[in-house]
Amino acid sequence: MPGGRTAHSRFKIPLSIEDGASCSFTKQSGTAKLLRMASLILWDEASMTKRQAVEALDNSMRDITGRRHQPFGGKAVVFGGDFRQVLPVVRKGSRGQIIDATPRSSYLWKGMRQLRLITNMRAHNDPWFADYLLRVGNGTEETDDEGNISLPQDICVPPTGDGVDLEKLIDHVFPALDHNMSDPNYMTSRAILSTKNDNVDKINARMIERFQGEEKI
């Protein structure tokens, strides 16, 4: 968001945080003064945040406003996020531990009003794909006995197994890459996503190699 800050920076939330913690600013600090003046707080991508961080802000807001019996000291707080995307990271955590770390497991959740957005603005020009993404996210897409979904063939790049699959993927997502590397609109209008860091590293390394090779030419 324009003029926005990360939650840890704005609210002085400790990086290592436990249940019952508070933010690290004092009642006399500039941060406290700003929060007392604020009429609305917007926290985007809150679904990726551990509930302890949200609860730390709640504890501090109650303290600096003197309204200890009102969530966030009576301030209106809007949380944005999608629990179908990336959840909080719990180092070597189990499924139960990850769920326990989400804001939905917080004592604050029962007092929150939920507003659901179901229109995919990025894919509104492709109604079929937008509907497909919603079915996958909502868990209503047909699955096999192991819970896996089948991707339609027309959105897949078939593997060949001959060692050039990575090159094929890059060429499919970034056609004519060598001629468009200096075009920021071309580079920012497409992306390759992966759930594993090692795959991302391989893709990045190969694209850097191609970029450096183009510079030499």
Image (cartoon, rainbow, N blue to C red):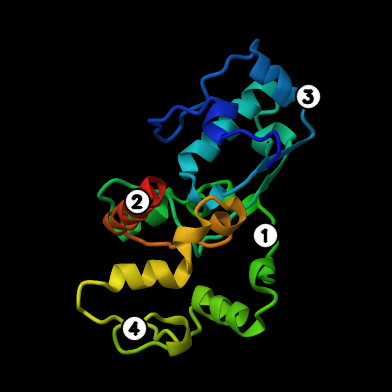
Q: Earlier in the sequence, mark 4 or mark 1?
A: 1
At which x and y percent is residue 143?
Answer: 39, 87
Could you give the CA–CA distance between mark 2 and mark 4, rounded to whole angstroms? 27 Å
Under mark 3, the amino acid is Met
> CB atoms at circles 4 and 3 under 8 Å apart?
no
Q: Earlier in the sequence, mark 2 or mark 4?
A: 4
Helix, strand or loop at label 4? It is: loop
Could you give the CA–CA distance between mark 1 and mark 3, rounded to whole angstroms? 25 Å
Q: Label 1: which residue? A: 114
Residue at 48 percent across and 52 percent down: it is 105
The front one of 203 and 56 is 203
Could you give the CA–CA distance between mark 4 and mark 3, rounded to whole angstroms? 56 Å
Query: In the rendered image of this protein, does residue 32 appear above or below residue 104?
Result: above
At which x and y percent is residue 187?
Answer: 53, 56
Q: Label 3: which residue? A: 37
Helix, strand or loop at label 3? It is: helix
Residue at 69 percent across and 77 percent down: it is 125
Q: Label 2: which residue? A: 213
2 or 4: mark nearer the eye: 2
Q: Earlier in the sequence, mark 3 or mark 2?
A: 3
Under mark 1, the amino acid is Gln
Q: Which mark is residue 158?
A: 4
Residue 87 sits in quarter: bottom left
The answer to whether residue 66 of the structure is visible from this angle is no
Query: In the rendered image of this protein, does residue 163 appear above or below residue 74?
Result: below
4 or 1: mark nearer the eye: 4
Which image quarter is the N terminus in? top right
